[in-house]
Amino acid sequence: MAGGKLRGGGDEPLTEINIVPLVDIILVVLIIFMVTATYMVKPAIKIDLPDAATGENIEPTSLGISVAADGRLLLDGEEITEEALRARVAAEFAKDKNVVCLISGDKEARHGDVTHVIDIVKFIGVTKFAINIDPTDGGTETTAPVPAASP
């Protein structure tokens, strides 16, 4: 007769709760939590930094260097000579070792000119630089034609 209570075959009220499906669901949720928790945790060293009333936020210095199609150099939108560029980057690097140089090269600029600017920046000691680009919709503009094989 105990089986009749579980099946609900009579008019008697259901007096027992089957907790096996509940335990199954809880275990599945626990496994999902354990798997996803490993992706959420970032490895880090906990450091308790001291408080100071006179602290300041330091903004990293950034220099925008552009190479025009005709080889002219521009620093933050103003034309500049190579010697002046070296001096200005060196001065900014002396003030802030975390200076960032954003290098832009015109599509028609010579590859060697852009590489020369990168060499100038790296020779001074700047290690943080980026090359500006215009993102395309799938790289269709960046594919170069394959040269024909010579006979």
Image (tube, grey):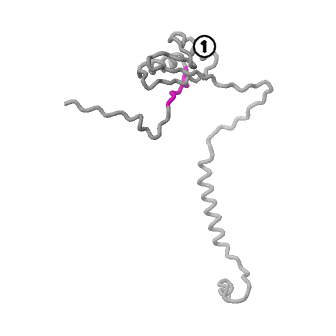
Outermost top residue: 83
Residue identified by numbered label 1: 91
Residue 123 located within the stretch drawn in magenta: no
Where is 148 relative to 29, above or below? Answer: above
Q: Residue furthest right?
A: 53
Task: Name the residue located 71 percent from the left edge and 27 percent from the top edge.
Answer: 57
Residue 94 at what x, y percent from top left? 61, 15
The N terminus sits in image quarter: bottom right
Amino acid at the residue labelled 1? Ala
- On the rendered image, what quadrant is the C terminus found in? top left
Give yes or no for residue 129 being in the magenta stretch. yes
- 75 above or below 24? above
- In the image, the segment drawn in magenta is 126-133
Position in image of residue 141 (x %, y %): 42, 35
Please tell me which residue lies in front, 24 or 53.
Answer: 53
Left-right relation of 132 to 50? left
Task: Work out which residue is located at the far left of the displayed protein and give it.
Answer: 151
User: Toward which corner of the image does residue 143 lie, by quadrant?
Assistant: top left
Secondary element under disc 1, as helix, strand or loop, is helix
Residue 59 image position (x, y, % from top left): 67, 25
Task: Count neighbours of disc 1 (C-alpha within 10 A) and say few if under 14, some if 14 to 19, many if 20 or more.
Answer: few
**In this view of the protein, which residue sits in the foreground, 41 or 147?**
147
Q: What residue appears at the point 72 percent right and 82 percent down from the top-left corner?
A: 14
142 or 42, nearer to the observer: 142
What is the tally of numbered marks visible in this picture? 1
Say which residue appears at 60% left-offset and 49% top-offset.
Answer: 38
Residue 22 x %, y %: 66, 69
Quadrant position of residue 42: top right
Residue, x 60% and y 52% (percent of image)?
A: 36
- Residue 126 position by quadrant: top right
